[in-house]
Structure formats: structure tokens, C-alpha cells
Image (cartoon, rainbow, N blue to C red):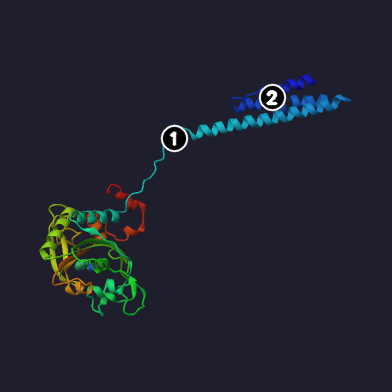
Amino acid sequence: MVKRIEKLIAEVSAFTADNVQQLEEFRVKLLGKKGDLSLLFEEFKQVEGEAKRELGQKINVLKSRAQARINELREALDSRQVGAAALDPSRPGTADYVGTRHPLSVVRSEILDIFKRLGFAVAEGPEVEDDRHVFAALNFPPEHPARDMQDTFFIDPQPADNPALLRTHTSSIQVRVMERQQPPIRIVCPGRVFRNEAISARAHCMFHQVEGLYVDRNVSFADLKQTLLYFAREMFGAGVEIRLRPSYFPFTEPSAELDVSCSICGGKGCNICKGTGWTEVGGCGMVHPNVFESCHIDSAKYSGFAFGMGVERMAMLKYQVRDLRSYFDNDVRFLRQFAAAV
Ligand code: PHE
């Protein structure tokens, strides 16, 4: 009997299974109801005396070795199956989605690149500003309505003569540059601006601007006009025309609104330009002497022009986005459409 048990032990350690079925057959043969171990236990009942201890131990060794071996082989077979499924080469692949640049970033850098080619440097400044840089130094009279709570987000009403607020335009950057630098100055100022307006398809309380400033000796309105014409043609195409309509800003004199001939219909009139053939893209003018004085630049010696435009508006004209809010919803279905615009 000892010999038979030892033979079975050797069989157990040598056994391998190619599949679950073979393993199951082996388990039944050894551990099943009528299997080898059951038979051994039956015989064992009849054994008497000294031999019983030794035999008992041997049978237990056989039983635990058999169980261990079966578990080991089952695990090996299971993991082989999982491995095979994970490596199924016939399954379709999953493509990684690579993010794209936001349309406003694309248009912003397009605008900046055009002015960089004309020798303009990029200047940036803080979004939380004070009254001096947003209004006072730009020749806004103390009671000007733009300072009103309806338009401006105030951060801190103190000190009363120079409260902290969110900038309503990036002209504040121009003041900061003129305060620390004498002409020649040739800068473009991109940035986020804030106005207390109800959010709708055409207005938002936060939007983006690019403003520009050129100060030197003998800078004229003709320089302004030519610069804007060059910009419009680079931005919207060689056939584009510009139109300057008299307007008013406290910080420029004379002032004008800049219109660009509608690039959608080529000036014939469509629903984007409301049938006029022109779309308004920004404001501009010759820097007011009072602005120079408050920044300690000699207005008798220097002159300059300034302009400002909305990035959302440019993007709208370029991509025909009709609702301003889509820029800030972060809906990937909207954003993905600009994947090619890099
Ligand atoms: N700062 C003006 C605005 O925010 C735009 C502008 C800039 C107009 C420079 C004239 C000159 O609307």
C-alpha cells in the first residue's frame, strides 16, 4: 500500500494539463467519490497497529499535494485564458483623442502674429486693476458713465479716489507701458476684460481684446489707417476694404470705429453683416494729449495712435460662430471643430 501511495504522489507532481477538461478528469480520478483517495481511505480503515500511523501520514501528504497541484494548474490555465482575451488582435483599436487649441487662442495668436510682423511687441498686464490705469489716466472725466457700477466690477471701493476693479479694457496695459517707457513705443496688448453685462448670445461679462499703441515722432492718422488696412487684409484676405467712421473715446482724438468689408459676402450684403456689406471690428484713434501728459510723455514732441478689437468678434467673423456663449461652454463637440485651425 505504501508503494501505491508513493507512486500516486510521484504521478501528482509529474501531472500537467493542457486544458480544463484534462484537469477535471485528473481531479475526479484522485479526489472524486470513487477516486484513488477514497479507496485508500477505505483500505486504511482495515489497517491495524504500528503501520496505521505511517500510512495515515502518507495518505494525508498525497491528499494535500494533489489539492495543491490541482489549484496550481487551474490558476495557470485561468491566467492563460485571460491573457489570450486581452491580446485578441482582431478587436478594433481605441483611438486616443488629442486636444486642440481653443478657437479664441487660435485667433488671438493670429492677430498678434500679424502685428509682430509690423514690429509690435506683446505687452501684458494685470486683470485686477485700479481706477487710475483703467480710467483716470485715459482722460475719463470723474463722472463718466463707464465708471458706473452698471459697467465695472469693483473689487474694493477703497481708496475712494483710486478703487480696485476688474479692467474693462486692455488700454490699462498701454498706460502701464507709457508710465515706465519713453517713445518709441510699439505694442499690442492682449487680455481678458470684464464688464458687468447680462450674458446673452451677443454679450458676455468677460471677453478678450487685443489693443495696440504706437507712439513716436510724427505718427499720423495715415499711419493708423495703413496699419489697420494691412491688418484687415492679412486677417480676412487680400480683397478686404476698411472703413473708418467718426466716433468718440475719451482717450483718443479724433476717434473712429473700424469697419471691415464683410468677408462672408464680399460686401454684397448678407445676414452676418445685416445687409450692409460692413462689419464693425473695433475702435481706434489718435492718442489724446491728456493721456500723454498723465504718463509724463511730452505731447508736443510725440504723437501716437491706438486701436482695440474684440477677439470673440474676430473669431465670430472668421468661423461664423453666432452665439458668444459657445466659446465658454467647453463643449468638446464645439471645440473639436477647430482641430484643423492650428
Ligand atoms: N478701449 C476701447 C474699448 O475697449 C477700444 C479702443 C482702443 C478705442 C484704442 C480706441 C483706441 O472699447
Query: Is 2 drawn above or below residue 125 in the view shown?
Result: above
Q: Which residue extends farthest right?
A: 49
Image coordinates for residue 274, horizontal then vertical, percent: 18, 62
**Position above or below: 37 against 179:** above
Q: Residue 196 carries which label?
A: none
Q: Which amino acid does the dot numbered 2 rest on?
A: Val
| Of callouts 1 and 2, the N-terminal one | 2
Q: In which quarter of the image is residue 157?
A: bottom left
Q: Distance between the residues labelled 1 and 2?
A: 39 Å
Query: How many residues crowd mark 1 within 10 Å: few (<14), some (14–19), many (20+)?
Result: few
Which residue was labeled with disc 2? 12
- Residue underneath mark 1: 91
Residue located 67% across and 29% down the image: 69
Name the residue nearer the viewer: 20 or 281: 281
Within the displayed image, which quadrant is ligand 1 positioned in? Answer: bottom left
Residue 160: where, in percent of width, then height?
34, 80
Residues tagged 1 and 2 counted as in contact (Cβ below 8 A): no
Q: Is mark 2 on a helix, strand or loop?
A: helix
Q: Give neighbour class at mark 2: few <14, some 14-19, many 20+ (Cα, 10 Å).
A: many
Query: Is 197 left or right of 184, judged from the image as shown?
Result: right
Q: Position of residue 197 (x, y in %)?
A: 31, 70
Position of 14 relative to 81 (above/below): above
Examine the rendering and report whether any part of residue 159 can be seen. yes
The residue drawn where x is 27% and y is 64% is 202
Specify the quadrant of the image occupied by residue 303: bottom left
In this view of the protein, can residue 250 be seen by the observer? no
